[in-house]
Amino acid sequence: MHTLYSLCFWLENTSMGSSIHNSTWMFPLIETAHLFGVVILVGAATVLDLRLMGVAFKDYTVSMVAGRFLPWIWAGFVVQVVTGILLFSSEATKMYGSDVFRVKMLLIAAAGLNALVFHVLAYRSVGTWEKDPVAPLSARFAGTFSILLWFGIVGAGRWIAYS
């Protein structure tokens, strides 16, 4: 038995994992909170991404949009992580064997890497371009890639239920 599978088996059989799995209402309530988290995170990220792409909110500086929406992005992310761990714990061995779950996790990692690269590289010089209606190519790329990744993450998340 693989070590990772053993860890999944253990997690699924903890009191937390089995309580969620065996409850009539816990999984649907946690999943509903997970969906609210995705709406908050992806909605707020999309607003910022559209500004970076120069498609919308051109009358607002990038810093203004980021300042307003980054707290929502982080709040949605925290909800996603907490509820995602709870959901995973209730069916960890099923997720271990799910290719769609792996795709979702890879897309999340790519979205995090995209955000990190954007903040380390393009956002450092935001003061020189944030008032421009269209951001530099690196920022537009980061915004476009972010939207594609988050929509892929949402799609993969929904697909998990049917795989």
Image (cartoon, rainbow, N blue to C red):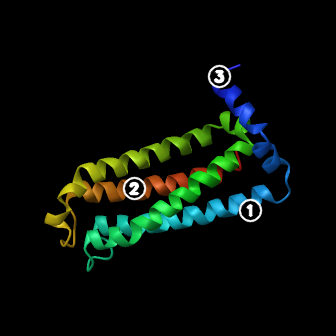
Q: Which residue is mark 1?
A: 29
Q: Which residue is mark 3?
A: 3
Question: Image point 57% across, 51% down: which residue?
Answer: 81
Q: Residue 66 appears in which quarter of the rendering?
A: bottom left
Question: Which callout, 2 or 1, points at the residue further toward the start of the chain?
Answer: 1
* Amino acid type at image mark 2: Ser
Q: Which residue is mark 2?
A: 146
Question: Image point 72% across, 36% down: which residue?
Answer: 11
Q: CA distance from mark 2 to mark 3?
A: 33 Å
Badge 2: how crowded within 10 Å, few (<14), some, or many (20+)? many
- In this view, the residue farthest toward the left is 128
* Amino acid type at image mark 1: Leu
The foreground one among 39 and 63 is 63
Question: Which callout, 2 or 3, points at the residue further toward the start of the chain?
Answer: 3
Give how far across and how far down residue 17 sits, in percent.
Answer: 76, 44
- In this view, the residue farthest toward the top is 1
Question: Which callout, 1 or 3, points at the residue further toward the start of the chain?
Answer: 3
Relative to 146, 105 lies left or right: right
* Amino acid type at image mark 3: Thr
In the structure shown, which secondary structural element does the residue marked by tag 3 occupy?
helix
Give how far across and how far down residue 6 sits, in percent.
Answer: 70, 26
Badge 1: how crowded within 10 Å, few (<14), some, or many (20+)? few
- The N terminus: image quadrant: top right
Give how far across and how far down residue 48 sits, in percent.
Answer: 36, 67
Q: CA distance from mark 2 to mark 1?
A: 28 Å
Q: CA distance from mark 1 to mark 3?
A: 30 Å
Relative to 158, 70 lies left or right: left
In the structure shown, which secondary structural element does the residue marked by tag 1 occupy?
helix
In the structure shown, which secondary structural element does the residue marked by tag 2 occupy?
helix
